Image (spheres, helix red, strand yellow):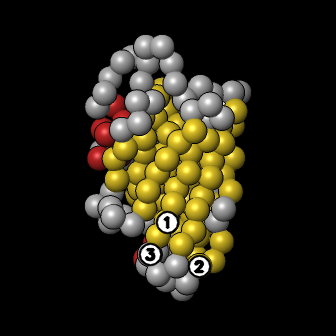
Amino acid sequence: QVQLVESGGGSVQAGGSLRLSCTASGYASVGVYNTHCMGWFRQVPGKGREGVVNIDSDGRADYAESVKGRFTISQDTASNTVYLQMNGPKVEDSAMYYCAADDAGSNDSDYCSRILLLNYHYDYTGQGTQVTVS
C-alpha cells in the first residue's frame, strides 16, 4: 500500500522561506523502465487544485509559472523523499499542499510534464500540509 507523508508546513512571513518534505512508502520513485513522478499540488478551499511542481525519476523538474524562480523541488531517490524549498513565498501561495506520486507504466519522458501542465490527477496523494503566508 502506497503512503505519502508530508511534513514541514506551517506559517511563514512573506519573503521568508519554508521547506516541505514528503516521504513515500510502498512506492519506488525509480524503476528500470517506467517513468515515475513525484510532486506537489495545492488547493485553496472553494478553488480547484493547482499543480505546483513535479520531478521525474531522471531528475527533470517542471514548475508552474506562478512559482518559477521561487520554489525548488529536489529528491532523494534512495529514501523516496521529495523536498519543496519555498523561497520568497507570497500571500497567494497560502494553501493546503499535497504531495503526490504517479507511475507512467512505461518509459515516457513527457509524462510528468503532462500531469503538471494538464492538471491530471496523480495515482497517489498524501493527506496534505497547510502553508500560510502572511
Residue 38, x across and y down, in percent? 50, 39
Disc marking residue 12: 2
In this rendering, the answer to whether 105 lies above or below 92 is: above
Q: What quarter of the picture does the C terminus occupy?
A: bottom right
- Amino acid under disc 2: Val
**What crowding class fits label 1: few (fewer than 14 Cα within 10 Å), some (14-19), or many (20 or more)?**
many
Please tell me whether mark 3 sits on a helix, a strand or a loop.
loop
Q: Nearer the viewer, residue 84 or 46?
A: 84
Cβ–Cβ under 8 Å for marks 1 and 3? yes
Residue 105, x across and y down, in percent? 44, 18
Cα gap from disc 2 to disc 3, whole angstroms:
10 Å
Cβ–Cβ under 8 Å for marks 2 and 1? yes
Write down the residue under mark 3.
88
Disc marking residue 131: none
Query: Quick one: label 2 or label 1, which is nearer the N terminus?
Result: 2
**What crowding class fits label 2: few (fewer than 14 Cα within 10 Å), some (14-19), or many (20 or more)?**
some
Please tell me whether mark 1 sits on a helix, a strand or a loop.
strand
- Amino acid under disc 3: Gly
Q: How many marks?
A: 3
Question: Does the image show residue 49?
Answer: no
Residue 131, x across and y down, in percent? 58, 70
**What crowding class fits label 3: few (fewer than 14 Cα within 10 Å), some (14-19), or many (20 or more)?**
some
Cα gap from disc 2 to disc 1, whole angstroms:
10 Å
Instruction: Say which residue appears at 44% left-offset and 75% top-offset.
Output: 88
Question: Does the image show residue 3?
Answer: yes
Write down the residue under mark 1.
86
Q: What quarter of the picture does the N terminus occupy?
A: top right
- Amino acid under disc 1: Met
